Amino acid sequence: MRTIDPSPDPAPFDEQPTQPLSESFGPQIAPDDPTLHASPGDVQPTAQQLPPLLWVTSPAPRQGKAAPTRPLTNGSNGGGASPKKRRGGLRVSRRTLIVGAGIAGAVSVLAATGVTVNHLLSPQSSSGTTALESPAHIGHLLRRAGFGAAPGDLEVYNRLGITGAADRLLNFQSIPNTTLDQKLADANLDFSTIQDQQRWWLTRMVYSAHPLEEKMTLFWSGLLTSSYRKVGGKQGFPLIQQQNDFLRKNAFGRFDDLLAGITIDPAMLIWLDGLNSRKGMPNENFAREEMELFSMGIGNYTQQDIEQSARALTGWTLDRQTLKAVFRAQFHDNGTKTFLGQTGTFDYKDIARIICANPATPKFLARRMWRFFAYENPSDADLQPLIAAYNSSNHNIGAMMRALLTSPAFYSTQAYRARIKSPVEFLVGAFRNLSLDGLGQANRGLLGAFVVMGQELFDPPNVAGWPGDQASASWINTGAWMTRVNLMNSLVALMANTPSFAQHLESDTQSQHIDTPARFVDYVLLQLVDGQMESTRRQMLVDYLTSNAKAGGGTLRLSGNQTLSGNAVRGLYYLVMSMPEYQLN
Amino acid sequence: MFNLSRRAMMKDGLLVVTAGMIMPSIFGRAVRAAHNAAAEGDRLAFDAQGRTLIVVQMAGGNDGLNTVVPYADSTYYSARPTLALKQTDIFTLNDRLGLTNSMQALKPYWDGSKLAIVEGVGYPNPSLSHFQAMDIWQSLDLNGQGTEGWLGKYVAGLVDKEGHPFQSLDIGVQLPAALRAINAEVPTVSSPQSYRLAPDAANPRGVDARTKALLKLYDSYPKTAPYAALLDATAQNAQQGSQQLLAADGSYKPAVQYPNNGFASGLKVLAEVIVQGLGLRVGYITLGGFDTHANQAKDQPTLLQTLAEGLAAFYSDLTAHGKADDVVVMTWSEFGRRVHENGNIGTDHGTAAPLFVLGNGVAGGIFGEPPDLTNLDDTGNLKFTIDFRQVYATVLDRWLGASSQAVLGGSFGNQAFLPPA
């Protein structure tokens, strides 16, 4: 069962656990009041501790030289968008994005300056739904194939077009990752604690210049999964990171290598009891889940296949000193096995090979990937290109991902906001969108919030991984929702303590000539929800901002003479990041 | 608020497959009613006479043979040379069965005839997959393809004019499939103290305007947009429930010291909601870790002790508050375990197993027939003697005032562990 402590310290691997920690099936009860802190030791700021002036005001704009105001979007009237393209200005699509069925008057805001909008896709995709337009298609791609757009990302990826953007995401090896490397070098993490491992991965997700690499690793972490709660203890915890490294390294490789490798992965040998499975008394745990959950899915094998496979997998255990996987021939059953219709003296590699050659496997993988990256009810036609890519590439996962990321269905309105953000997508995305620091230094309260939201890294609820990876509605319940909203409250408190954030805002309002509350709302909506929001609801945000103009907390100077209340601006961010659209990916 | 018919929901491709989908039609009005009642200081006028069922999921597949032990059967000892519990490890229930000492905390309830043990519970063609077996138990579809949970169906059918946000409640972080419902929102709570919207520390005076704007953004979210019903109903229920829980939390004092673990803390939340009269009809809590492929001798007793001590504290607390007559607790696990132990001081996935029903209203004793250890199926597993749906039917018909036929979609008969309604 799960403990009430957000950061339990299970017994070391080489002792009997003091708590039953076999394959966990249970609730997690987590701590109160998650808060964000800039460093683990910090105390949550109180009102008294906050600086009296929360918003740094930059020098007044040079009025005489101010360029004529150019619309960021459709202005404050909520009506049609300007189609004009100006040099250094903004181009706005006329078409309104229809989300779901028939929302009239959705606001369509355009992305960044001078972007040549890429209309690679025909308006009608093969599935009959409407294709996404700029900037929604790039925002969508970056959320699904990563953790959302950091400032500047929309321009960079928009310029590349869909194919170029997919290429950049897939062929990341040559892209330097200097910011991340520096952050990790500075972090001084202790990998014998699970908290630091979680901080390590969160840091990777927030700062990596290879977002798809981290996203794919998260996918595998929920599929070929293990939990630190059974593997852990100070000695065992590093095995979890080792497994994560294995998944990252092989994330886009041959599935045969992934499946064989995970079979003798030390954390997996502990998690699914392989390490004690011996000739004459094989343990069925891994053998069953390898087929049911990791590769083919239920219905494609028999109990006898499980028993035969369990025999083939015997003999692998851990060296108690080095905790490396070792093969003990005397414990291996080298007799003849009949597995999925084939007969031989199979070992674990043969089992993986036979599974990977089974037609059920690419179907299973394609569906799992589609559900995770695109939407949850794919048609057979949606999956066919992925299955074909698997078969024609000698089982290469990268080829499947390319097929997915270049599929018209992936960029259709059917895919848009079709999944609820996972807790990790939600919070990592929020930090990325706003370019805020601090998630990598999450304190235990914040790490505990991931537990309450239903997704603690390295701790899926059971061997089937996170149910939300397949059916994202299960990410939302009242407790999880409350925690999400309260985290956004903590995030806007962090804003108040981050002078650079206010400076960045002021710089943007000047350079983008944001001169009214409505245009500021559009700026925020573009940053966070691709500018896609129904006009009457957008107006509610404008009303909130204007009716709280005197809410204090310093001021944010707009491009003209107007100012906004710092507290109202933070309130606006809270509202946008708590509202339904932002819960969706 | 709005009404979307189920047909409309199914028509919308966006809403078809997602698990846990819920619709707020009745619920929306109901919560508004509750809000009015609360505003009028009328919270405790909720129907405290109503009955409550608490369902405890023992996740992972509890080994029934080392829980309710067939101590007189030599086959048990030969199948389990290292794992078999000795006579000194159990207390006898009758001349065939004994209960593990790990569950000593429930002995007073057995002695007082408030604890029923239903033996051999299972279903035809058992699945040895955790996930398919759990789906079968929760959604009643023997192929594991069901989408609605049996408890969700029941809750959605409740006529609750008072509109209690907590007419059902899941303790934990993940709504179980048993509580998936159409037309009912089932809240999930892990800690009552953190179940509220936090104010902005830098601007505490602005919190009302901000919260109002937030709820308006949910209320106005287009009904045809993705996940509209789920998101709107969740936000409403969370906000209304948090206000009730906040009020309740101030005045509830547990009458006993609960054990210091997550399971017992969760039971305490359920007790609080019952004692404070927040209208709970179905409470749900999960204790996980029963998948004892290895180290069972160490792990399972700890879990069963956690279960028994938690339930004993819960029962005592309810008794002290005069609520024990209104509450019945039922346990379940997706399967029992293999009769023959494996080589790792553990047992692999099995089939039929006993479950527990506890309460003042329960007729104590053993119900059903323990499966024959010498007559196993071709996977080396027990053959069930009681269909799990008969247990559900008994609870629905005899305790929850429901028609089991309507909820279960068939007639499965009743057991005698509860008196006829």
Image (cartoon, rainbow, N blue to C red):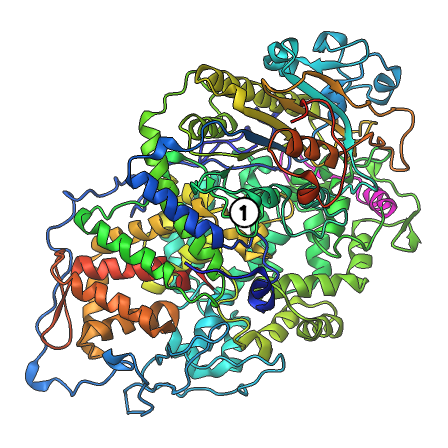
**Quarter of the view holding residue A43:** top left
Residue B267 percent coordinates (x, y): 50, 27
Residue A525 percent coordinates (x, y): 33, 70
Question: Residue drawn at (21%, 62%), measured in percent from left and top?
Answer: A569
Q: What residue type is labelled 1?
A: Gln
Question: Residue drawn at (73%, 49%), measured in percent from left and top?
Answer: B144
Q: Can residue A178 be seen in this view?
A: yes
Residue A314 is a magenta residue: yes
Left/right placement of residue B217 relative to residue B300 reads left
Name the one closer to the observer, A397 or B206: B206
* Residue topped by disc 1: A241
Residue B146 vertical placement versus A564 (above, below): above
Indicate the chain on which mark 1 is placed: A
Residue B283 percent coordinates (x, y): 53, 34
> In this figure, what is the number of numbered marks?
1
Residue A145 percent coordinates (x, y): 51, 67
Q: Give the range drawn in magenta.
A: A303-323
**Quarter of the view holding residue B34:** top left
Name the one closer to the observer, A426 or B135: B135
Name the one closer to the observer, A487 or B6: B6
Q: What element carries label 1?
A: helix
Residue B324 vertical placement versus A7 (above, below): above
Which class describes the residues within 10 Å of circle 1: few (<14), some (14-19), or many (20+)? many
Left/right placement of residue B371 relative to residue A549 reads right
